[in-house]
Image (tube, rainbow, N blue to C red):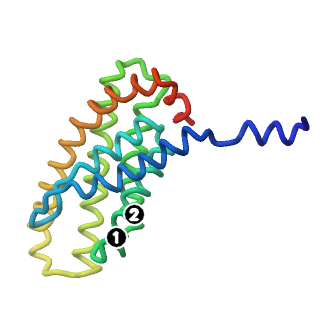
Amino acid sequence: MSSNSSSSASRRVPPAFLAFAGMMTALVFVSNYLSIPTPFSRLHVANAVCMLAGMLFDGGRGGIIAGLGSALFDLTFPAYAAEAWITFLNKGLMALACGIIVNDKDNRLSRHTVALIGAVTGAVLYIILYLSKSYITLRWVAPVPTDTIPAALAGKLGASALNGLFAVIAAPLLYAALRPALERAGIYQYLRG
């Protein structure tokens, strides 16, 4: 066997990774449908699933999975479609930050503590990104009277904080349940970078 064929074989993506990454992307997509509309935004479980992707797949791969699943959801709604690329970035960065913290090999804290720190970091980052995007939209893209912006942002902050709180509770619990099961099944090793 030539060195070229052996090096290309070692770079092949394992089928288990592709299958699980596809399933996780679909789970992110579907989790966006599990929501309650509010006057300012939606309360949903998608942020928790996005952070779970970051925790399980590491930051980079999990960020792509979270961003892709969320952007695909936006593309299914005409009202959200134009902002799908922003959603890809915001949800991807949330999962990236969470995943980097959770998968830091030099970290000496317990797995549960690190998962909680990663989830809080991801949630706070997402809230900052979402409110920044909302401010830019309200101020310059689809301008509204300037004196109404603080009230609109306060409403969006409330909904985002509830989404974030749910994600901070749910993502570490799901990770604590899924990681050992995936390790026992021999799948977890294929999710790593």
Query: Which of the 4 image quadrants contains residue 74?
Result: bottom left
Give above or below for 141 relative to 42. Answer: below
| Other-residue count near label 2 (Cα within 10 Å), few / some / many at <14 / 14–19 / ≥20 | many
**Horizontal relation, residue 35 to residue 136: left or right:** left
29 on left or right of 96: left
Residue holding disc 2:
72
Compare residues 53 and 156 and report the one nearer the observer: 53
| 128 vs 81, nearest the viewer | 81
The answer to the question of whether label 1 and label 2 lie on touching residues, with beta carbons closer than 8 A, is: yes
The local crowd at label 1, few if under 14, some if 14 to 19, many if 20 or more residues have their Cα within 10 Å, is: few
Per the image, the residue denoted by label 1 is: 76
In this view, 153 is above or below 181: below
Depth check: give the residue in front, 39 or 190.
190
Q: Please tell me which residue is depicted at 28% across the width and 48% down the height of the picture.
A: 47
Classify residue 32 by image quadrant: bottom left
Q: Quadrant of residue 4?
A: top right
Q: Residue furthest right?
A: 2
Q: Residue at x 16, y 49 (%)?
A: 161
Counting from the top left corner in percent of width and height, residue 157 is at 16, 56
In percent of width and height, residue 48 lies at 28, 44
Point 21% across, 81% down: residue? 143
Q: What residue appears at the point 90 percent right and 35 percent down from the top-left corner?
A: 1
Q: Amino acid at mark 2?
A: Leu
**Which amino acid, mark 1?**
Thr
